[in-house]
Each structure stands twice: as structure tokens, then as C-alpha cells.
Amino acid sequence: MSELPKKSTAFFEWYNEVLERAQVTDKRYPVKGLNVWPPFGLSIRSNFDRTLRSAVEAIGYQEVSFPTLIPETELKKESEHIKGFEAEVYWVTKGGATPLDINLCLRPTSETAMYPMFALWVRSHKDLPLRIFQICNVFRYETKSTRPLIRIREIHFYEGHTVHPTEESATRQVQEDLGSFAEIARAFALPYLINKRPDWDKFPGAHYSLALDIPFGDGRTLQVGTVHHYRDNFARPYGIQYETEQGGSAFGHQTTYGISERLIGGVIGVHGDDKGLVLPPALAPTQVVVIPVIGKGSKEAVEGAAKEIAASLSASGFRTKVDLSEDRPGAKYYAWESRGVPLRVELGPREVEEKAATLADRFGRKRKVARSDLVEEVRKDLDAFHAALSEKATTRFREQIGVASTLAELKGARSVHLIGWCGKEECGHQIEAGVEGGLLGTVEASSPEGILPGEAPPCIVCEGTPSRWSAAGRPL
Amino acid sequence: MSELPKKSTAFFEWYNEVLERAQVTDKRYPVKGLNVWPPFGLSIRSNFDRTLRSAVEAIGYQEVSFPTLIPETELKKESEHIKGFEAEVYWVTKGGATPLDINLCLRPTSETAMYPMFALWVRSHKDLPLRIFQICNVFRYETKSTRPLIRIREIHFYEGHTVHPTEESATRQVQEDLGSFAEIARAFALPYLINKRPDWDKFPGAHYSLALDIPFGDGRTLQVGTVHHYRDNFARPYGIQYETEQGGSAFGHQTTYGISERLIGGVIGVHGDDKGLVLPPALAPTQVVVIPVIGKGSKEAVEGAAKEIAASLSASGFRTKVDLSEDRPGAKYYAWESRGVPLRVELGPREVEEKAATLADRFGRKRKVARSDLVEEVRKDLDAFHAALSEKATTRFREQIGVASTLAELKGARSVHLIGWCGKEECGHQIEAGVEGGLLGTVEASSPEGILPGEAPPCIVCEGTPSRWSAAGRPL
């Protein structure tokens, strides 16, 4: 097989080719922007879902499932929301040959599907907070050019929705959501920025929107998730009201928390290298591959030992495969590396004799360990690999974030820049013009912490104060 | 809360009310036939999915995920298939305000989404057999009246699809699928019939269709799953061809295997009783509930012990909850029973003192066991409960299956009847007229085995031989 394009010089060619070769998604489906998840990609997606599920269940969310179809009458109840979505929803207008009485859209997100039910479910202050989530598919009629996992028309989506008695309680939820996202990002070894989007760029209907942004490749940034505070903006039109402790009536305050398959694209884009995928153990379909290296006459003994090792690693909870194909060891190494397997166990006649095995991680670090300690050593190496992956990504993250103090420096910038911004809309639009559309907003936090270099400088446009550290970049 | 309607005399009222009270699905969504899965129902559904997934992965299926939308051009490639579906698919005709160039339907099933990709994936005999499945949602524009889990418009669906080199290899797959269904039915303690549908009632495009039928309630039967053999009926129009070992070219032979959320409806309908849900341990969101029964001054000790017990059962892998609410024990028993929890641990001051606990299963069978043996005894009781559930269902299954030797006996029959049928279409239609539409087909197998009383009698209509045991009933 020909070499991959270089990640450093041809990022998007590299990205597309890595996804295709490893069979993460297959984009040959007869409708553009609707992709197929083959077994390998779906296994990554299932691991992704499991990580999300456990992070949000830990903060009290319960899983539900809502219909895909939303009646036009419900979609239109919140006026800003529908303005934001009406140009990009798919419309079902016929059942068989019969025109529908009320057109149904394919959910672009589920506020307007869920909130009529929340109005039934929420009666009293005792029903609050309500915290539910679903993992589903949402649809956007994208007119821009599509890209696997990043910009597509049917999107694998996690969405959390809450109702609270007060604005403050909803604000605390926003913080808890960010805490759970920190867990998820840790599992995927991914650094990120939390940016509060400018008012003109918030989610349609939101009070404010926090975006989870990562530097991606080719100087672009990728929004991989969002947390929105809605106040009672939706509760009013949808009638989500409760009886207070004092016997009065009040509208609920709401938040949402969304993460899409984009995050998988982010992980692949951030960690991958010129050999192909590099996957954190939490996402890898196969965490450990055992490869017998057969010398003369040793086939039976070596393969037998390889199978035993694989069985014992599986029994200890590692997703393990043993590769007994006829290919040469070098070809096997290459194939498994390109699919991002974190750890390889190499086993030759010598290792069998010595009751040992060689561990090689995806970064090429090798060591020989005793068979009797194998499970423990594999656990250590996977942890060490995860830590190294995280450190590498963090180092690169810091390199990708510059500081600019004049608009001239921003012009044509190929990475994220921290700047001072006074918060005024006219200054914001001038910044956007400078970086081709990307004022990511004020920086509320980052992982790792401590990327802001001291006090914020005056506004990069008007030189006014007070100003806040803000991020400018070019979002995909 | 008022009493439930009686299952024996008002089956469908009972069924609807049981689902609603336990919050299995919520049918108040603003579009008829599109239901919401609240947390309790979704937990049942997740357990259901896990059982299916493990049964089909054990016979070599791999999980994938395909788009929801199918272009009209692909849907129409197999002529019988489209005739069967065109009246009942939802059509997406617009993206935003723009009419689509090619209309897209919401999948009613995924043959026509998958097979264009199979044509790309299958190249050589080495790629066969191909066995993939997805768990997804499918859509039918139902015009009949809808019923939760049974007849709805967005359906939670398992679908397995295979490609084989020969017709025989596909036939063997059909048998393996039936084997995996036997595993699933065993996990749900569910008896069933396998009926080969009459030719005029097979799946549109199939060579033949095997249906998994259960007697349900009110004298009706429920088709909870199907296995179809397609021969090369789809492979030809979709171009699913492979290079044979001899270097020639041949079309693949295909099968499909489908199970929908109807099976959950089946489990609820078959096992439930006048107190509400009765769930097999494999499906129950909570398998064991621990209920402290507090006497004077014992609150702290009893609740402490209850929490310890719940923690140790959870650690042993049982889905366990402890109910520390302020309700009286009797009210708690009633509430958990109505949600179908298989096993309850009752713990009072006396049990704490004796280092014991009382186990009570959903059938009301009670015994006291030592705390030190609790995990083992809970395991035993759950197994015994599952066995009793299965036996009860089997006894009732046998009672619900009669034998008829004249058309007069069939007329107005309120249960499934075994009859002789010569296989001729004209006789088949007369049988259907007699039972209002339900010649379920020839009986290929059953679980439990041995329900056929000896050799098949002559055809119930023409008295011709040879004939085969067939089943007549009224499908929902």
C-alpha cells in the first residue's frame, strides 16, 4: 500500500486517507454526507458512547430516547430557535403517497421534541432538577462541502437536557457539565479551550453558549461540544412550569450539553501520525494485539503461547486480539499500527523459552517482561502510553496557541491566538474580519490550566479596558 | 392508585395501563405512534439490546451503523420489495426550503441502504460469508391504530444481514439465526413457534420467510421476529457479485434476521400479571431491591445494613437498588412489584440481629437466608425465579395452542390452532377466511419442542394428503 500523505504538510488529505484505510467510516454511500460506520469504526463509536455515558451518569443524568421526527408546530414555538434552524432541517412531507397534515422535520437537536414532554413531566419543585440525555442521530441539511465525522448530514450525537428551579441552579449545572467533559477529555487524552461565544454567535435561543474548542490541523479549530444556559427562554413558550415550595408557580431554567462524533474526529486529528491512527486505550477497538513471531519449527509452541496470553489478557478485561494470519510479522506490525492499537505483545521462540514477552507501544517503546507479570505490566504500559499521549498532545496544544497584540499579527494567522477584547460587538466583528470569521469568544477555562499569560491586555481593536482574554482562530 | 384492569378479562386495557404506570414508554408525544422511552423503559431496552448483541456476536455477526435515509433510486431497485413498502414509507422531500433532487425515504428496513455498499465490500469468495447487524430505528407510516411497542411508527429494531457464496450456505445461516433466537428467547423465558409463512405472505423480495410467533393475549398472536432467505433475489439487482475460487463470477445468496421492540411487548404481555410487570432477570432494570423494614429505634442499624447488602450485591454484578424512601414497607413492595423487580430483600431489626435477610421473589415465594450466604442465595433465587417464569409461560403456551380438524372449529377461535394444510393457496385462503386473516404458515419448530401431536392430519379444507402441521391464529 502506498504511503500516507504527511500529516504536517497535507493535513486534510492525511485525515481522509487515515479514516478510509482504517475503515472508521465509509463515505461511498450513495447520498453525499451520509456515512456508513463499518465494524471497526462502530467499535470506536461504541467505546466513545460508553465513556460519555459513564461520565454523565456520574453527575445524575438518566438516559432516555425520543422520537426522531418533530412536528413543525413544535419546532416553531421558540422564535430565535426556528430562525437558526429552518434553513437546515430536512422535511418529511409525505407518508406513502399521502401528504402529511403537519410536516415533520428530522431533529436537528431535540429541544423542541423534548420540551412538550417536559411540560408534562415537570409538575412540582420535587420533580427538579430533571436531568436526562440521549445518544442518537441528528440531521442537518448541510450545503457546505462535507467531511467525515466533522461536517456531515446525519450526525451521531450525545445531548443532555436539564430543568432547574432557578437560574443559579442551572448555572451550577453548567459547571457540572464542564466537569464531566473534563473527565471525557481526560479519557481521550485531549486538551481543549472553553470559550464563551460572542452573543451574536450563541446557540439560537440560548442565554449564553460555552463551546469546547480544540486546535485541529492546518491552523483550524474544531468545536467538539457545547454547554448552553437557556434561562427560561424555552420554558416560557413550552410551558415548563412547576409549583414552588411556597405553592406559587414558576418557569424552569434550562441547560443543554452536546457532544457529537466530531469529538472522535478531533481525537483522530490530534493524536494520529504518519503511520495512521493513534488511539487512546479508552477508544481503541483492540487495546492489545498479540503477534506470534514464528521461527523454524516453533509454530505450534509460539502460537499456543500467544493464544494463552491473549486469553489471559481478555479475561483481565483488556480488549485483546491475537493475529494468527499468514502475513510476515513486519506486515502485521504495520497493519495494527495503522489502526492505532496502543500496545503490541511480540512473542517469539526465545520469549516462549524464557517465559517472557516483549511489549511494544504505539510510540515504538519496547521492553521485555516476565510472562508471570504480564497482566500487570500490560496495565502499566497502557497507562504509561495514555500519559505519554496526553503529554504529547498538551505540548503541541501549547505550541498551537499564540498571543497577538495587534490586528496585523492576526491577519492570516495559522493557529489560535489569545488576544485582549473589550467585549464590544463592533470590535468583535473587526477581529473576525482579521482571522476570517473566527472570534471564538472569551476564554473561560482550559485543559491544561494556566495557558493564559497573566492579566488580559487592552482590546486588540480599540485598546479599551477592561478587556478579557479571548481566542481568535479559524473554526472548521 | 386504582387497581389495574384484569389481564384475563381486559387484556389490552391491562397492557396499556401496565406500560403507562411503569413508564415503559410514554405515548403522549405530540405525534401519534411516536413514543418516548423514559429512563425506566430505556433501561429495559438497553438490557434487551445487550442480550441480542451478545447472542448474534456469538455466531459471528459484527455491528455496523448505516444511514437512516435511503434514496428513492436505491429503494426501487428490487421490484417486489418496493411494491411491499411504497405505501408505508415516510418521504423526505425538502432540505430547508429547497426541494431535494432525489427524494429520500426513512428506512422501513435496511436492505436497500446496505446492499449498494455490500456490492462494494464483497469482491472475492474470501470476503464471504459477510455477517453484519445494526440496532437502529426504522419507520413505517402506519395507518392502522397504533399500540405501544406493538404497532408504532418509529420502531426500535435489530436487523442482521448476511451474504453467502451459495444457497446452501445461506440456508445454514437461517438455522444458525434460529439457534441464536433460541438463546434470546431462553433469556426472556419465552416460548414460541417458528412458522414458515405462506408464499403470499412472505417478506417482499424473499425466497421464503420464517416468522417467530407467540400467543399474546385476547386470543391474538404476535410476530416478534423473522428470518428470511433471499437467495440471490437482491444480489442481482444490487450487483452483489464475487470472484469464485475458480476465478469465475457469481452472485451472493443472502439472508436477513430481524427482531423489533415488539419482542419487549411480547415479554410484558406474556409474563405480566394483575399486579403489573413481571420481568425476567435479563431484562429487569433492577434485579434486586433491598427494602429496610424499620422498627422502633432501629432506623440507623437497619438502613446501614440494607446499604451494605445493596453494595455487596452490586459489586457481585446484580443490578441492585436500596429503597430508603419514607413510604411504608407495604407501599414499597407494591411499587417495586408493579415495576416487575424479580427479587426483593427484606431486612428488619430481627434480621439484622440474626445476621440474616428475607428473600421474596415476584411470585411471592419467601425464605430467610444467612447474610454470609446472601450473594450465592440471591443468585440461586434469581435462577429459580427465571426457571419458574419459563415454566409458567410454557404451561400457558401449551394451553393456548389447540388442535382443530374442521373449519367449523376454527371459526371464531380465541387461540392458536394446529391444523393440517396441504400447502395449496386456495385451501390457505379458506383457512384465513375462517380465522379472520391468520394462516401463520407451516410449523417448522417450536420452543419447547414436541408440541405437534404426531403425524399431520389431512388438509383441513380439501382433506388432501400429504399435508403438514400448520398454525392458524389471529396476528396482531
Image (spheres, coloured by chain):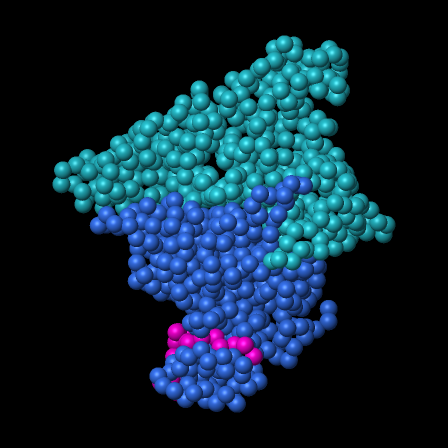
Chain colours: A cyan, B blue
Residue A197 placement, left or right of A13 = right
Rendered residue at 48%/50% (across/down)? B74
Asked if residue B9 shows in the view, the reply is yes
Q: Which residues are magenta?
A: B436-458
Front one among B429 and B474: B429
Give the x, y percent position of residue B45. Answer: 55, 57
Rendered residue at 33%/28% (across/down)? A2
Front one among A136 and B323: A136
Give the x, y percent position of residue A381. Answer: 38, 33
Give the x, y percent position of residue A410. Answer: 61, 14
Magenta stretch encompasses residue B446? yes
Choose top left, top right, bottom left or bottom right for residue A298: top left
Give the number of callouts.
Answer: 0
Give the x, y percent position of residue A111. Answer: 69, 45
| Secondary structure mostly taken by the magenta-highlighted segment of the chain | loop
Residue B393 placement, left or right of B145 = left
Front one among B136 and B278: B136
Q: Relative to A328, does residue B303 appear above or below in the rendering?
A: below
Rendered residue at 41%/35% (across/down)? A20
Rendered-image quadrant of the N terminus of chain A: top left
Choose top left, top right, bottom left or bottom right for residue A447: top right
Magenta stretch encompasses residue B326? no
Asked if residue B324 shows in the view, the reply is no
Among all residues in the image, which is located at the extreme left? Answer: A297
Rendered-image quadrant of the C terminus of chain A: top right
Rendered residue at 61%/49% (across/down)? B92
